[in-house]
Image: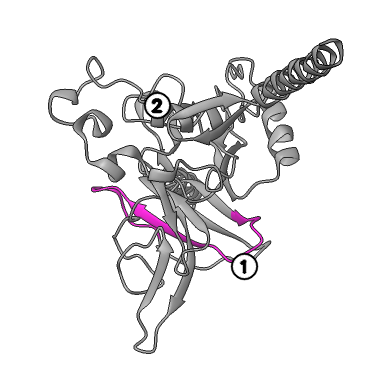
Amino acid sequence: MAQLSLLPLFISFSCAFISGVLSGSFTLTNNCAYTVWPGVLSNAGSTPLTVTGFSLQKGESKTLSAPSGWAGRFWGRTICNEDSSGKFSCVTGDCGSGKLECAGSGAAPPATLAEFKLDGANGLDFYDVSLVDGYNLPMLVVPQGGSGNCSVTGCLVDLNEACPSDLRVLGEDGSENVACKSACEAFGDPQYCCSGAYGNPNTCKPSTYSQYFKHACPRAYSYAYDDGTSTFTCASADYVITFCPPISTSQKASSSTSSHPQAADTLPLVNSSMVFVGGEELTSRAEPQAAGSRLLSLSVVLMAMIWQTRLLHLLF
């Protein structure tokens, strides 16, 4: 009987142990009009998840459980295929494993990354969406069921179409831009890579190129020291990662953070007033309207000059 009396204590201890081992879950959803092959990489010292690569057809979702203290990243691979020898590869986000599973290999840039550190300082999860290694897909991260400053983050804009010409990655046939490089990858300059003499926040500053990413996606990391407006925290949450999220859903997700008073949306998810027009120049949508007004004014001036010329001809 004494042994039986220990059963409730054993059950309680087991539940506590399990709850400590399993920290949360990640649900990856593909809302793109095409197949996406997510990749998963666990940081050094973190237990790898049971799956490191898989495919998601349009509208499909897959949920992965993560152990306590897990740290790592997720990304989407695109335009993938298997050749006649069985080698699997992708045009963007390829992890170089030659297989569907990435098996400990990370994404070849450029790739949009969702990065996580669960159960970090003060028991908080730290997470962000990073464009430091470039961009290939729109992505949204939404915490669910957590407490604290559980802000939604991501990059919802399709940056491929408007990517600066010197950062573009073209598809296999060369007719479509399928990804957008970081300036570091494109030029290898220390000032863009935050390396060498630029390897600290005092010397490494936003470039025109990183500002292109930041203007379009204000909450995403745009360069290495973009921590202040790009890292978010939440406690005891599960996370939904959506590729190609619809803007309407994203807006609803943003409003859901109102249940957390500390989750002030100081930055919008999308800065829709900013568009890229070529080279290193960023401009607002108001500028085409201003350009139209200038063109109209010029037309009026030209017409006046023509009429004045005709009038002088008649008089003399």
The residue labelled by disc 1 is 57
Picture quadrant of residue 141:
top right
- Location of residue 91 by image quarter: bottom left
Asked if one can make out residue 232 in the rendered structure from this viewpoint, the answer is: yes
Spatial distance from mark 1 to mark 2, Cα to Cα? 36 Å
Q: Is residue 176 above or below residue 315?
A: below
Q: Check disc 2 and report the residue beneath it.
A: 208
Q: Is residue 30 magenta?
A: yes
Q: Position of residue 261 (x, y in %)?
A: 64, 15
Farthest-out residue, bottom: 84
Which residue does the image show at 38% across and 71% down from the upper left?
Answer: 89
Mark 2, Cα crowd under 10 Å, few <14 / some 14-19 / many 20+, is some
The span shown in magenta is 29-49
The residue located at (58%, 20%) in the rendering is 267
Q: For mark 1, does the 10 Å Cα neighbourhood hold few (<14), some (14 to 19), or many (20 or more) residues?
A: some
Residue 49 position, x and y percent, is 39, 58
Q: Residue most toward the left?
A: 196
Q: In this orientation, does residue 218 appear?
A: no
| Residue visible at 86% across and 15% down in the picture | 314
Q: Closest to the observer: 275 or 91?
A: 275
Tell which of 98 and 183 is nearer to you. 183
Q: Main secondary structure of the magenta part?
A: loop
Foreground pick, 228 / 185: 185
Question: Where is the C terminus found, in terms of image quarters?
Answer: top right
x%, y% of residue 186? 30, 44
